[in-house]
């Protein structure tokens, strides 16, 4: 297991909800970042193979991570999904990973309950102070667990609500310059809608809208003024499925993602330093007002991330997937292609996704060669609802 060495103060400076990046040219960048960014990592191999597409795709066991309102439309009454994602493997990190598990249960043909959990391990870290004195080892980790309820409002429209508990233990128990750091905790909720306009053969459009991680700020000290925003997000999605015959179909989709977090204030001096008074106001803003403030500014289009993907299926047993994810350079410039495959045997399905390498040298995408391995189960539970639910592909 590779050991990472960080100065405690540097690590904690990264825990805040923002970092400011400044271009070497005259253009100034102000990247919107948040605490607990692991909540923005795609935790599913199927969606990971389609550029993180998931708001309006067909329902599956991992729907709670993308659009919980899809679950009442699933063909099987019970779904369970597990995914393992080694993270930043291309940088030589062997002990950083994301584990996720999700499942739903349809109470009847109209409603379902669900639960999911994400566990993000940052590996072993050796903490040191300014002078290089070793403070000890730690194993930073973050967890997000949620429970949700979804139901159909009509034969085509579904709605869902979920509540999430977030625990971020990055440097709990360590002290630096008189400050003791503790695990951060937050509570958030999701609201989602799903509209399925497909015909009985499973052909047609579907649409999704989600508001996720609408919740409290999170802090790592006892100072109430040093709390940061979590990644509240708005996603709009659409997908179209074309059925060629009883064996062959293809789905294409597009998701638009918008963080509901305002950019931290930056002064206009030559150093680009943050103005302390404006920063205090930024931190003291209420969570609800921050959602609306996230739409202020002249460059809203640059704040939208795009997921585009496609999935081909043969006999609903073999799947091939491709996708592309786009983020504007002013917000970090994550841009990558993905690919994936899946195979279903009986009630079990295996999914695999791969993030295609891009860039070279200092411009190489650190997410290059990211792999995701998924296992899911679609179960009857003694009550197959497929005859009365949508023919949407599972």
Image (tube, rainbow, N blue to C red):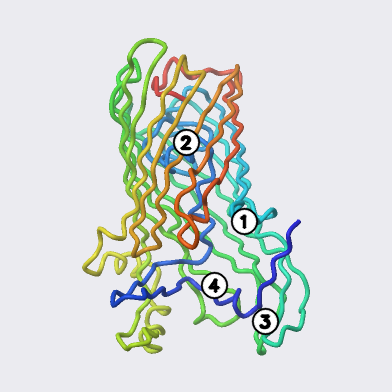
Label 3 SS = strand
Using the image as rendered, state which of residue 222 and residue 372 is in the foreground: 372
Tell me how far mark 2 sits from mark 3, CA to CA.
44 Å
Residue lying at 31% horizontally and 60% vertically, measured from the top left: 303
Residue lying at 35% horizontally and 85% vertically, measured from the top left: 278
The image's mark for residue 339 is 2
Q: Earlier in the sequence, mark 3 or mark 4?
A: 4
Q: Which residue is mark 4?
A: 14
Q: Is label 1 in contact with label 2 (beta carbons under 8 Å)?
A: no
Residue 269: image x %, image y %?
Answer: 32, 88
Q: Is residue 234 above or below residue 76?
A: below
Residue 283: image x %, image y %?
Answer: 42, 78
Q: Which residue is mark 3?
A: 180
Label 2 SS = strand
Q: Is residue 369 above or below residue 14?
A: above
Tell me how far mark 4 sits from mark 1, CA to CA.
18 Å
Q: Quadrant of residue 255?
A: top left
Using the image as rendered, state which of residue 202 and residue 307 is in the foreground: 307
Q: Which residue is mark 1?
A: 143
Query: In front of the other: label 2 or label 3?
Result: 2
């Amino acid at each position: 297991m590779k050991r990472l060495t960080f100065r405690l103060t540097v690590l904690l400076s990264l825990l805040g909800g923002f970092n400011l990046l400044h271009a070497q040219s005259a253009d100034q960048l102000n990247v919107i970042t948040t605490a607990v960014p692991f909540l923005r990592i795609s935790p599913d191999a199927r969606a990971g193979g389609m550029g993180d597409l998931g708001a309006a795709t067909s329902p599956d066991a991992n729907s709670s991570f993308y659009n919980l309102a899809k679950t009442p439309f699933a063909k099987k009454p019970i779904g369970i999904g597990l995914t393992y994602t080694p993270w930043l493997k291309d940088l030589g990190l062997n002990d950083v990973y994301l584990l996720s598990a999700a499942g739903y249960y349809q109470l009847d043909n109209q409603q379902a309950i669900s639960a999911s959990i994400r566990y993000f391990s940052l590996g072993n870290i050796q903490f040191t102070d300014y002078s290089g004195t070793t403070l000890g080892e730690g194993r930073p980790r973050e967890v997000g667990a949620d429970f949700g309820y979804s139901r159909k409002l009509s034969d085509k429209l579904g709605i869902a609500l979920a509540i999430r508990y977030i625990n971020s233990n990055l440097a709990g128990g360590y002290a630096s310059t008189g400050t003791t750091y503790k695990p951060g905790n937050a509570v958030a909720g999701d609201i989602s809608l799903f509209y399925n306009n497909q015909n009985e053969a499973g052909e047609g459009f579907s649409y999704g809208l989600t508001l996720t991680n609408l919740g409290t700020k999170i802090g790592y000290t006892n100072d109430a003024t040093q709390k940061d925003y979590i990644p509240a997000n708005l996603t709009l999605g659409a997908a179209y499925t074309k059925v060629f015959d009883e064996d062959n179909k293809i789905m294409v989709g597009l998701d638009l993602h918008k963080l509901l977090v305002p950019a931290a204030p930056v002064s206009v001096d030559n150093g680009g330093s943050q103005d302390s008074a404006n920063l205090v106001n930024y931190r003291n803003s209420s969570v609800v007002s921050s959602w609306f403030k996230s739409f202020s500014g002249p460059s809203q289009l640059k704040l939208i991330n795009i997921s585009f993907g496609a999935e081909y299926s043969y006999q609903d047993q073999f799947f091939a997937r491709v996708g592309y994810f786009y983020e504007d350079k002013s917000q970090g410039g994550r841009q990558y292609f993905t690919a994936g495959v899946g195979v279903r045997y009986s009630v079990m399905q295996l999914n695999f996704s791969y993030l295609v390498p891009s860039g070279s040298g200092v411009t190489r995408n650190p997410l290059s060669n990211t792999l995701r391995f998924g296992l899911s189960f679609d179960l009857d539970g003694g009550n197959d609802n497929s005859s009365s639910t949508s023919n949407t592909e599972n």
